[in-house]
Amino acid sequence: MLPPTPIALLDLAAEHARYQVELDAAWHTTVQEAAFIQGPAVEQFAAELGSHLGNVHVVPCANGTDALILALLSLGLPAGTEVIVPAFTYIATLEAAALLGLRPVLADVLPNTFMLDPAAVRAAITPRTGAVIVVHLFGQCADLEEIKQICAAASLALIEDNAQALGATFTFASGEIAHAGTVGEVGTTSFFPSKNLGCLGDGGALFTRNAVRADLLRQLANHGQNQKYHHQHIGFNSRLDTLQAALLRVKLRHLPAAQAARQAFAASYDAGLAGISGLQIPARDPRSNHVYHQYTVAVEGGGRRDALQQYLRKHGVPSAIHYPQPVHQQPAYAYLGYRAGQFSVAERLCQQVLSLPIHPELTATQGEFIIERIQAFFAA
Ligand SMILES: *Cc1c(COP(=O)(O)O)cnc(C)c1O
């Protein structure tokens, strides 16, 4: 049985077609103005995104991985300093630390939200720890309340890898509401095309509430210079292209509607998939809203996830596995010396997670079809 209309895991062509006139105008202006590096759109976009996130400093850069490198560089941690990262994340989170000669220290994640377990963070702290990188995975905030407290108590810098949760907010016990990425010393994000706010190529940004740090980050991303040919720091070239900034200004205007569409679609998944035995739908932390970069379920039982993925593929429903292998079992990170079984939640999730289609172009009919197919698989 095939879907009434083809279902895409992500349909950027259809989404961009809706903004075509605005994207064409942005492209046209950029070509005419010919200020391709650090042109006016870069600062305009940074200011617009900053006010969208509650008046935070935004420093654009070349991609989300560079943003993590820049965030760590700005802390000036001595080589060998330990940086605590979740054992279940995209590789870039620890790659940035490893590349700078810092030592990634893994901490396991919670079985319900799949995000950093505060107790595991506490247990991983040593006298050599300098920072914690929390990842707001799949579009929801990690436990910022606890992790912020742990960092403050141990004098550790908190970095938020917010590549997947731009626009999410977290409500603290004090009643304060903060945007994901604006709570720690530095927040980072990615505008990789598939992210909720994606450009038409690579892009990234850093967030901070500290004007001095924003200035440092701006310099580090531009050869460490405070003015042309005056280099205060050893930096590198990690600038957001003017063209990407101009296109991002268009897409930022449409982000609230795209986010609402994702949330509505997720609510229909929740309603259709709740209560299926052997299937765990995404857990919601009541303190955070969820912008659903991914709608990721967990399928219990050996081999059952792969069977579901195959069954869905046969019925024209694409899906993806985020992520198939835990970071401590990646060959490049064998030098960290971790053993199989050491991060049991992360290891189990790699066997069980499956991300279903979720993007603003999906129709209600397609949603019903996907839900019916999943129900049929579990009923068989
Ligand atoms: C996408 C992503 C990154 C890296 O972003 P790039 O722009 O591709 O370099 C880092 N961390 C997480 C959690 C991501 O999802």
Image: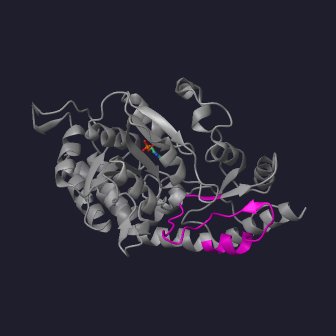
Q: Residue at x 41, y 53 (%)?
A: 150
Relative to 191, is 25 on the left or the right?
left
Give the residues in magenta.
Answer: 267-296
Q: How many marks?
A: 0
Comparing 99 with 355, the one in front is 99
Report which quarter residue 229 is drawn in. Answer: top left
Q: Residue at x 57, y 36 (%)?
A: 327
Comparing 166 with 110, the one in front is 110
Asked whether residue 286 is drawn in magenta, I would say yes
Q: Residue at x 44, y 52 (%)?
A: 163
Q: Position of residue 226 (x, y in %)?
A: 11, 40
Q: Position of residue 102 (x, y in %)?
A: 39, 31
Relative to 351, is 163 on the left or the right?
left
Quadrant including the N terminus? bottom right
- Answer yes or no: is residue 269 visible: yes
Relative to 294, is 351 on the left or the right?
right
Comparing 248 with 94, the one in front is 94
Report which quarter residue 180 is drawn in. Answer: bottom left
